[in-house]
């Protein structure tokens, strides 16, 4: 994910490291590749410790940088930076940095940050040239002709000059179907909010699933999208004074903003789904525990029944109607004179021998 800062974080870190070790010469040879097909080459030798060479390669409209763009680059830090002609092979710009002129205090952080934003200056200068001509009344052949800006090979956008405004059209493409759904909802909401009275001064935003009429005749690979086209109408009030830099930077980072929104929304939805799933699992576990406790209580209530089932019917009757135990309990409590003799006479059972024979009576 590309950052929203104007300064390159990786380039800034390397330059700060070189500046902090200026007293100790060191060999530096770094190649940095960043979002938007931007390449940096930082070179510093121990034989020439005061100077660092920074080469930049970035997509541009023409084969070489325009004089106005070079003047804007020189104005970043004129005492520290010097443009080398010709640039290093494979790069559009090579700068010679004199770190001896950068003080070791709080000002150094600001100066190095400004130097690290040179790529943003190059990109914005080209788009500024187009936006400055909004109020021009000249009718040229370029009017209504789309200008393709390729700051990233996979994410080009078009700028169309019209009378009184400039329209920026962004073809939107995503790999995942879920990203397409989130982005489409975001574009529709952006269009609804932009048409409200609260944001009446904002550029008019239009989303369409089909290419606008101004893009007729463009290559089919540039018009094949799965999330439609987003258009912004830039007028003169959007480029007045300091608004020009802000408008240019917002247009250059629109793809990055959409990707950031889609990624954040997808992460939020996944977190909510995960939390919901955990709450449902906890609820099911709680219900399962309650059911197990109820089953245990029922099992405890049926233990006596299970014990009775283990005995035969005769044993159950004997345990239930055992008179001898009852009599023993009575005897242990109350003593009656002569009851033992009565019991031996009347309560004893006669014993029969197996050898006793019976004769049939006729």
Image: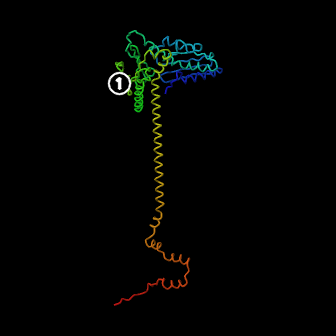
The residue sitting at the top extreme is 138
The residue sitting at the bottom extreme is 362
Percent x, y of residue 121: 51, 17
Residue count near mark 1 (Cα–Cα under 10 Å), binned few <14, some 14–19, many ≥20: some
User: At 38% across and 24% down in the image, what residue appears?
Assistant: 207
Coloration mode: rainbow
Q: Which residue is mark 1?
A: 210
* 353 relative to 51 in the view: left or right: left
Front-most of residues 356 and 96? 356
Labels in figure, total? 1
The residue sitting at the right extreme is 23
Point out the image quarter for the C terminus. Answer: bottom left
Percent x, y of residue 3: 51, 25
Residue 327, above or below 66: below
Identify the secondary structure beneath mark 1: loop
Percent x, y of residue 186: 42, 28
* 39 relative to 183 in the view: left or right: right
Percent x, y of residue 200: 43, 21
Please tell me in which quadrant of the rendered image residue 49 appears. top right
Residue 345, above or below 310: below
User: At 55% across and 82% down in the image, what residue appears?
Assistant: 336
């Amino acid at each position: 994910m590309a950052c929203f800062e104007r300064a390159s974080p990786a380039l800034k870190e390397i330059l700060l490291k070189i500046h902090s070790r200026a007293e100790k010469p060191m060999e530096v040879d770094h190649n940095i590749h960043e979002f938007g097909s931007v390449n940096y080459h930082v070179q510093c030798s121990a034989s020439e410790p005061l100077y660092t060479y920074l080469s930049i390669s970035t997509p541009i409209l023409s084969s070489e940088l325009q004089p106005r763009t070079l003047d804007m680059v020189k104005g970043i830090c004129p005492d520290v930076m010097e443009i080398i002609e010709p640039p290093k092979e494979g790069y559009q710009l090579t700068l010679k940095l004199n770190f001896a002129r950068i003080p070791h205090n709080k000002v150094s952080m600001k100066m190095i940050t400004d130097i690290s934003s040179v790529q943003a200056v190059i990109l914005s200068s080209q788009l500024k040239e187009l936006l400055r001509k909004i109020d021009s009344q000249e009718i040229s052949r370029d009017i209504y002709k789309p200008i393709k800006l390729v700051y990233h090979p996979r994410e080009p956008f078009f700028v169309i000059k019209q009378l009184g405004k400039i329209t920026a059209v962004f073809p939107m493409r995503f790999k995942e179907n879920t990203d397409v759904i989130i982005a489409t909802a975001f574009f529709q909401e952006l269009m609804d909010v932009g048409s409200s009275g609260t944001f009446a001064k904002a550029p008019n935003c239009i989303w369409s699933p089909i290419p606008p009429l101004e893009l007729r005749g463009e290559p089919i690979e540039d018009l094949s999208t799965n999330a439609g086209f987003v258009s912004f109408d830039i007028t003169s009030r959007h480029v007045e004074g300091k608004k020009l830099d802000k408008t240019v930077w917002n247009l250059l980072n629109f793809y990055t903003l959409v990707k950031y929104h889609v990624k954040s929304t997808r992460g939020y939805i996944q977190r909510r789904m995960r939390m919901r799933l955990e709450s449902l699992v906890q609820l099911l576990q709680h219900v399962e525990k309650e059911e197990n406790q109820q089953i245990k209580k029922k099992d405890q209530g049926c233990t006596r029944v299970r014990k009775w089932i283990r005995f035969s019917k005769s044993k159950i009757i004997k345990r239930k109607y055992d008179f001898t135990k009852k009599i023993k309990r009575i005897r242990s409590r109350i003593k009656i004179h002569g009851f033992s003799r009565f019991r031996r006479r009347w309560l004893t059972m006669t014993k029969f021998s197996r050898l006793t024979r019976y004769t049939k009576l006729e």
